[in-house]
Amino acid sequence: MVNFLYYGLVLVFSMFLMHPVYLAISLLGAFCYSVWLQGRKAVRFTVLGLLPMAAFAALINPAFNHEGATILTYLPSGNPMTLESILYGFAAAAMLAAIVLWFSSYNEIMTSDKFVYLFGRVIPALSLVLSMTLRFVPKFKAQLQTVMEAQRCVGRDTSNGSLPQRLKSAARVFSIMLTWSMENAIETADSMRSRGYGLPGRSAFSIYRFDSRDRAAIGWLLLCGAYVASGWIAGGARFRYYPTVKAAPVLPLTVSFALVYLALCMTPVLIDWWDGRVWDAVRKEVSS
């Protein structure tokens, strides 16, 4: 519940708060937590995959959106290129990058068993479908690697041979993966049905317990979320791109909204960092 509430808050704020400061805070928090969880893999994904995608999104907006009062130049088509459209393109790119990074860490934290635990009693069929969907991509990648290695061992490598041979090998791998994915979905559904999943009165084993730490974490998240939402409603996070750039005045109150949002986005990193320090101290004490 704590994990799901946290990601619900940061994703909603990341999608609707278009102020550059809030976008930068969201992007910073998402990047830091992804690096904390995945290390170099997150950095490589950000540099090689996310940055080109964000750059493309930033460049595509001024090419098709010509709103704004500050005209910088004219395109060969005769349409104006405005400062406001460029700034909005960068804001949209930052929002897209932040959401992708948040979902990257979401897949690491909100595992399928947690999702089914939360929603299995309320919406059993939908929670099972969503859980299977979230698990599909990593399982598909692992199975695809296994199938391609097996095909390579029997001389059907997709990277060798003439173009027709490679296309034929790729089509065979695709057919195998399509059959596997359909059979896996049917087997999972039949397995859950045979265990009585979704039936009224069905009990389920769970390792999750709601303790005082969870209460404190939920209280903190609700406090931060309510404070940021109140600032959003009051206009403290307002930022207009069209027709001219205009932002909410910089006041101590509006700065406090951004600082609380920063604390919200950095909460999991700070918790994990503190737990790591406590664990290291306990290990040193035990070893000595």
Image (cartoon, rainbow, N blue to C red):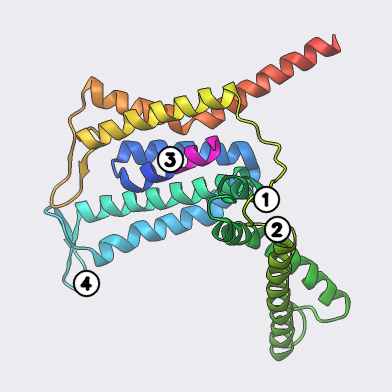
> Which disc is residue 10 wearing?
3
Q: Element under label 4?
A: loop
Q: How would you rate the neighbour count of disc 3 (Cα within 10 Å): few for under 14, some for 14-19, many for 20 or more?
A: many
What's under tag 1, amino acid-wise?
Arg
- The residue to which callout 2 is attached is 196
Q: Earlier in the sequence, mark 1 or mark 4?
A: 4
Q: Position of residue 281 (x, y in %)?
A: 72, 14
Residue positioned 24% across, 20% down in the render: 252
Q: Element under label 1?
A: loop
**Horizontal side, residue 196 vs residue 150: left or right:** left
- The residue to which callout 4 is attached is 76
Distance between the Cα atoms at labels 4 and 2?
65 Å
> Which disc is residue 166 wearing?
none
Q: Are marks 1 and 2 in contact (CB under 8 Å)?
A: yes
**Horizontal side, residue 1 vs residue 76: left or right:** right
Q: Are marks 2 and 3 in contact (CB under 8 Å)?
A: no
> Which disc is residue 202 wearing?
1
Q: Are marks 1 and 3 in contact (CB under 8 Å)?
A: no
Magenta residue check for 7: yes
What's under tag 4, amino acid-wise?
Pro
| Residue lying farthest to the front in this orientation | 201
> Mainly helix, strand or loop, the magenta region?
helix
* Nearest to viewer (mark 4 / mark 3): 3
- Please give the range of residues in magenta: 1-9
Magenta residue check for 64: no
Q: Is residue 224 above or below residue 155?
A: above
